[in-house]
Amino acid sequence: MTMTSTPRRSASIGALALLVLAIALPACGGGAKSSKGYTIKAPVLWAGAGADGKINSGVEDATVTAGDLEDPGFTVDLASVKAKDAGPQWLAASASAAAVATLLSSKDPSRLDLSYTITGQIDGPSGGAMLTVASLAAIRGLKLAEKTTMTGTISPDGSVGRVGEIPAKLRGAAKAGYKTVLLPMTNLTASGESSTSDMVEFGRTLGLDVQGVEDVATAFTAFTGETIYPPATPAPAPTPATTALVTKQATRLLDRIRTESTASTSASIIVQLGQASAALASGDVAKAYGLGVDTYTLLVRENAITNINSSFADQSPSGQLATLKEMSKALELFSSAAIETTSNITGLDPVAQLSLPFAMGWFTWADAILEGTSSALAAGSITPNSYGITAAALAEQQAAIEVFGPDAIEVVRSTPNPAVTTTTPPPEFLSGYTNFLVTAGSANLDYLSAVIGSKATTDSNGNPVFVALGMNALSATVEATPADTQPVNEEIQQASVAVTYFIFGTGLVSNTGANGIIGNGVGADTRSTVTLPGLINSVLLAESGVAALVDLLASRNLDPASARWSAQWGVAAANALNGSGRDAAGEYLALNELWYDAINCSVLYAATAPS
């Protein structure tokens, strides 16, 4: 999908204006009002290796200001040399915090400004959770608890992810005079230079009250005494119409797998098809569809490699390359046409219009992968040894465009919410979120490039890193996205690009670190260095967050059927593959679905909030 126009404001981190906040720093956690908005100090816990190789740690105070300003957006002032040296790390942490806090705040981002003044160092995205809590508190004009700090990454669903160097961070907090430290729940047991692996007990020896938190909601309450959302009763069961539709989709998907299987199809694929069929027969439609998505992905990969090897038998390397180029370009045209078609809003109510960008993620990501792959093939950076995995990656994108994407769109279009009105017209509302999500996505890429060096488009074995190719394509697209509000179908397309850019950028950061993901999940399975329950815990946390949002939306008589169904089958797939040896593949699939779903529900809640 190619967009040509004036670059969107704040689309590039390099273009961020530096804002010097002329506000006296309040006491730890306290708040102060000024003409610029409400300002608080966020105590960010950090640890990192010094010049001598030893781990240093401490608490870095970042100033967060939130206000309704004439020029809303996101700005960062790196006010010292140390902070400037850690620029990409601060930008990644603060940009993700700004995006997630805005989503959780139920505010219209087009009327909100978040700015950060930073004077010292940080150890990367582990400051994200603290900055998110502080940002949300500043938006609401609340003070933070005294002598309390925290560490943890932030995910798009609001869950707090695991980080490293916990013993050192606890020592740093104690030395700085703090009394309470919040840690990711998965970090309550940690290794390192401590007398015990029990971090609650280790903290006690330092005079610290160490508490585990799973998500920003829990941390926000610990810091402010307030809740992010009001309590809500459980949502009613999915409607009979939705149940009938997704059952039809699951049946259709399994029939497709049977049709495209051959006598040479791997036994493991046939076994998994049997498991999905049994689940469908027993009425477990979510498990049937979730396993079906994974099974069909495996099948199209296998068939693509078989077919390409057969067609390549009599071709020279140049002929093989020409074949792949033709395949990629044809699919790229196919995906672009699908994006145009699916963004048509004829007959759709505002809720469906706001949900389309998230269901369209299948098309948007496929389009980016295809564009990036076509460019790599044209440049000759994909070698003959990688032609098989490239064919498999192309086949996956075709499955997304032909099967998974249309199914997601069908649920959106089949779920009426005619009685629900939005506080702002969908085009304007989506435009504001696009700005924030694009900025956060760019910050994540800059962090990976500067700190981890992960912008390479080939791995150590010379195979394409399709996620990097896709992210590069998305980066070019967002740079060309118009600054002003466009017609609703164009805003839907742009919002889909922005949310995909943010989710996969965040995924690259957290998957490289906290989730320990190896591989990129395109053309071949992901693997994880994290032992269970590390990664599955992230899935379960995200699931609970989406469920809570579904309950809140139900209290407004809004049915987010698409997000709810996506979460159900994604989690079902992860659970079904748990212990299979392909655990990480299922969990990676589920997390991607859940992150789209969480943002979708947050946008719907904000868009329908009482004025």
Image (cartoon, rainbow, N blue to C red):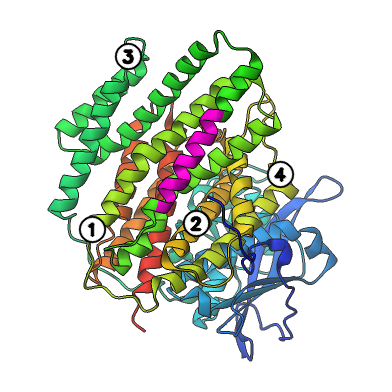
Residue type indicated by callout 3:
Thr
Cα distance in 3D space between marks 1 and 2: 22 Å
Q: Is 333 one of the magenta-colored residues?
A: yes
Cα distance in 3D space between marks 4 and 3: 43 Å
Q: Which residue is mark 2?
A: 499
Residue type indicated by callout 1:
Thr
Above or below 602: residue 56: above
Q: Which residue is mark 4?
A: 452
Picture quadrant of residue 85: bottom right
Cα distance in 3D space between marks 4 and 1: 43 Å
Cα distance in 3D space between marks 4 and 2: 23 Å
Picture quadrant of residue 376: top right
Instruction: Name the residue located 53 percent from the left edge and 33 percent from the top edge.
Output: 328
| Secondary element at tag 4 | helix
Q: Is residue 185 left or right of residue 564?
A: right
Of the numbered discs in the image, which one, if any, rests on residue 403?
A: none
Residue 124, given in percent of the width and then of the height, sits at 68, 54
Q: Which residue is mark 3?
A: 262
Does the image show residue 525?
no
In front: label 4 or label 3: 3
Residue type indicated by callout 2:
Val
Of the numbered discs in the image, which one, if any, rests on residue 415?
A: 1
Q: Which residues are magenta?
A: 326-340
Residue type indicated by callout 4:
Ile
Taking depth in this image into account, of 150 and 578 the one nearest to the observer is 578
Cα distance in 3D space between marks 1 and 3: 37 Å
